[in-house]
Amino acid sequence: MLDSISKRILEEVADLHTVPEGAYNIRVNGKSDSRNTTANIDITSKTDVSGIDIRIKDGTKKESVHIPVVLSQSGLKEVVYNDFYIGENCDVTIVAGCGIDNCGNQDSQHDGVHRFFIGRNSHIKYVEKHYGQGDGDGKRILNPVTELTLEEGASAELEMVQIKGVDSTDRKTYAKLGAGARLVVRERLMTHGDQYAVSYYEVSLDGEGSSADVVSRSVARDKSFQKFDSKIIGNTVCNGHTECDAIIMDDARILAVPGLEANSLEAALIHEAAIGKIAGEQLMKLMTLGLTEAEAEERIINGFLK
């Protein structure tokens, strides 16, 4: 049974107010709390390491899988391996994410390794949200690794979100795309206090006609540090774009490292990066409408991260 803290975290990381429809596996404090499978989506526990295998049958459409993780025990550290095998001609939504409530003095940490094998002409939307809360001195640490292999004509849409409460994160994402495959990444990130966040993306466009669009929007406040490191490798006729757009505030630091590697005359690759403070005219415009400076800043930030 989920307690009130777990329910609150599930709302934050998976938008769950009740038990989800379809397939799901809810993990709480290192153990599977509840699970459901469907006729088209099977979930089984791994026998050699901690984690699960999710197998989705050919032709599965308009179904979802929820696999959120909750940590509410201070000092708990775990590494979990989840593998997704998506058949051909599928269209599914996968909602992951992890929330940590740490009210103790020991660090709590969840490292999740997710591997996706996406069959021909299949599409997935993958939503990964990270959230932290708790008034203890122990840190809330999340280090996700995402690996994707997209076969011919496959596509993946990734929504990577971290807005509040995570003290340290080192996110790594790797993707290999076959012919005509497409990857879209939308990262939204905010750090504050002394928080530390690194995002690394490496995308190999191996198949003819493949494409990738990797975009990060972030806000760094107080004394926090962010690093966005994105590398797109074009090995054939392909299109790649990576972009970092960041707002810096207070005494924060941001490092953007957009990278391109063209190994073919026909690879068309673009990178963009912009880091700056909130424009004074934006603040003034909102303040003339009756908002305080702090309220105006929050309004701008919320709009920027949508």
Image (spheres, grey):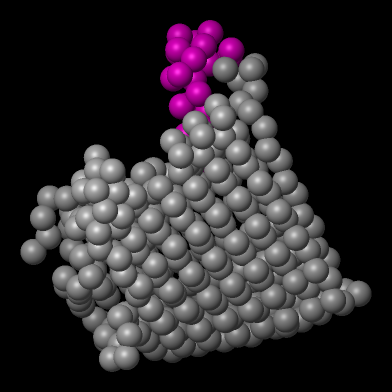
Q: What residue lies at 72% left-to-right and 55% top-to-bottom?
A: 258
245 up-or-down from 153: above or below? above
Q: Is residue 229 visible?
A: yes
Q: Position of residue 83 (x, y in %)?
A: 41, 82
Q: Position of residue 202 (x, y in %)?
A: 65, 69
- Identity of the residue furthest to the right in this view: 265
Where on the picture, by quarter, is residue 249? top right
| Of 138 and 190, the residue lying toward us | 138
In this rendering, position of residue 50 left or right of residue 215: left
Q: Is residue 299 magenta?
A: yes
| Of 154 and 69, the residue lying toward us | 69
How many callouts does the rendering have? 0
Q: Which residues are magenta?
A: 284-306
Q: What residue lies at 12% left-to-right and 60% top-to-bottom?
A: 2
Q: Is residue 195 magenta?
A: no
In this rendering, position of residue 87 left or right of residue 254: left
13 up-or-down from 275: above or below? below
- Identity of the residue furthest to the left in this view: 1
Q: Position of residue 39 (x, y in %)?
A: 27, 86
Most common secondary structure along the magenta stretch:
helix
Q: What residue lies at 30% left-to-right and 81% top-to-bottom?
A: 50
| Of 196 and 288, the residue lying toward us | 196
Q: What residue lies at 67% left-to-right and 60% top-to-bottom?
A: 230
